[in-house]
Image (spheres, grey):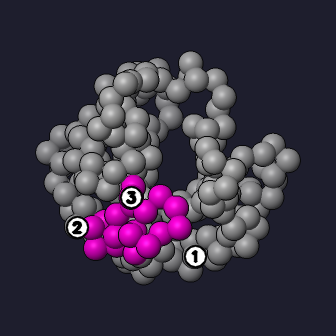
Amino acid sequence: AEAVSRAGATILRGGAYKPSTSPYSYRGMGIPGLELIAQAGKKFGLKVVTEVMDLRKVDLVAQHADILQIGARNMQNYDLLGVRSFETGSRNMLDLAAVPVMQGLAHLPVIVDPSQATGKRELIVPMSLAAIAAGADGLIIEVHANPDQAIKDGAQSLSPAQFDALVPQVQTVANAVGRTVLMPARV
């Protein structure tokens, strides 16, 4: 939280509950995880977003998070999840044309998640920059202190140093397309 706040993040995403295809993979920390992410957000002045996976836990999660995320694995209606592809070079197909399309259809900000979409660390930076150029209002980027040792999702996470290097690149692309990046006060 400290590293991403210092680099310019305004929102901290953490997975207190982790949906997975396999019931044997890491499922998250639950309530202790909610408490930890809330403490980290408060300490470093970050809004907190985490996924809620069960209707019965909405109130509990809302006590600890500013933003509740409904993830792709919980949507169940695959028609609403956008285009699918047989491409094997990345986890999913990140359809950046959807950014301006969605902006024309809704008044809400359009946020792109290149970490989950690509599933590959080496694709996060170029897809982040492309998303900003396409008009995305924000990015969700997974950052881990030691991605290669992460319990889950390390392959799709940047290190704090990689994230820190990405932020000025995002600012440059945003400026090039006539936009600005909101930067919080330094902690």
- Residue 172 placement (x, y as % from top left): 16, 54
Q: Looking at numbered disc 1 in the image, what kind of residue is underneath it?
A: Ala
**Disc 2, disc 3: CB below 8 Å?**
no
- Residue at image point 49% right, 30% down: 107
Q: Earlier in the sequence, mark 1 or mark 2?
A: 1
Category of crowding for the residue at label 2, using alpha-carbon neighbours closer than 10 angstroms: few (below 14), some (14–19), many (at least 20): few
Mark 3, secondary structure of its residue: helix
In this view, the residue farthest toward the left is 176
Count of numbered tags = 3
Residue with the mark numbered 1: 40
Residue with the mark numbered 3: 155
- Residue 66 placement (x, y as % from top left): 64, 57
Look at the image and tell me in which quarter the C terminus lies. Answer: bottom left
Q: Quadrant of residue 76?
A: top right
Look at the image and say whether residue 21 sits in the magenta stretch. no
Q: Quadrant of residue 179?
A: top left
Q: Which residues are magenta?
A: 146-163
Is 48 drawn above or below residue 98 in the view shown?
Answer: below
- Residue 68 placement (x, y as % from top left): 65, 49
Look at the image and say whether residue 161 sits in the magenta stretch. yes
Between 70 and 20, the one nearer to me in the picture? 20
**Disc 3, disc 1: CB below 8 Å?**
no
Q: Looking at numbered disc 3 in the image, what kind of residue is underneath it?
A: Ala
- Residue at image point 62% right, 57% down: 25
Q: Earlier in the sequence, mark 3 or mark 1?
A: 1
Q: CA distance from mark 3 to mark 1?
A: 23 Å
Is 74 drawn above or below residue 167 in the view shown?
Answer: above
